Image (cartoon, grey):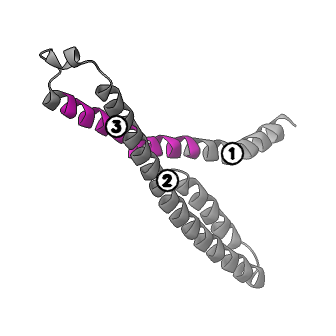
């Protein structure tokens, strides 16, 4: 899972670290210790987000694929005998189609859906970070 919000959060923590170098020595040390704690929190959060994201999207993709295969197979079993006499409806072709279609659904719902959700989350985090700063600059420019 691509955690696209990672760079924005690390940018904020680095900005805080750089700003703390311009403070007095005693205050700078406490600010830098806080920054180290922020980096550790970001690392732990990233580990948890990656692990949960990959795990949950994989489980969801597998469950959806299994459900699709089961429903399709049950539908094939309910077909009339004349259906299987047609040229394109042999047992081998139906089994291949069942396997291939379920695999395509699994591929669409697993890692690729995880990347889409991560990208949308990264965009949301970027907007949330940028909006207060942009508004403050706009308000400062108009006064």
Front-most of residues 118 and 111: 111
In percent of width and height, residue 58 lies at 42, 51
Secondary element type, mark 3: helix
Closest to the camera, between mark 1 and mark 2, is 2
Residue lying at 56% horizontally and 70% vertically, measured from the top left: 44
- Report the residue at 63% width, 47% height from top: 125
Q: Which residue is mark 1?
A: 128
Is 16 left or right of 90, judged from the image as shown?
Answer: right
As displayed, is residue 126 above or below residue 11? Answer: above
Q: Residues within 10 Å of mark 1 (few under 14, many from 20)?
A: few
- Gap between marks 1 and 2 measured at Cα: 25 Å
Judging by the rendered image, the residue that carries numbered circle 2 is: 56
Work out whether residue 61 or residue 41 is closer to the camera in this orientation and state it. Answer: 61
Name the residue carrying label 3.
69
Residue closest to the far bottom: 26
Residue ranking furthest to the front: 81
Span colored in magenta: 94-121
Q: How many marks?
A: 3
> Residue 39 location in percent, x, y?
59, 71
3 or 1: tag closer to the N-terminus? 3
């Amino acid at each position: 899972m691509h955690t696209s919000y990672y760079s924005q959060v690390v940018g904020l923590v680095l900005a805080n670290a750089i700003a703390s170098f311009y403070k007095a020595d005693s205050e700078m040390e406490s600010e830098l210790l806080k920054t180290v704690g922020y980096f550790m929190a970001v690392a732990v959060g990233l580990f948890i987000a990656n692990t949960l994201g990959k795990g949950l999207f994989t489980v969801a993709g597998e469950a959806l694929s299994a459900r699709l295969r089961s429903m399709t197979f049950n539908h094939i079993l309910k077909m009339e005998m004349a259906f299987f006499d047609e040229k394109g409806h042999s047992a081998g072709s139906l089994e291949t189609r069942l396997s291939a279609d379920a695999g395509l659904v699994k591929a669409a719902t697993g890692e690729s859906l995880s990347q889409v959700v991560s990208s949308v989350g990264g965009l949301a985090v970027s907007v949330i970070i940028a909006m207060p700063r942009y508004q403050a600059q706009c308000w400062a420019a108009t006064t």
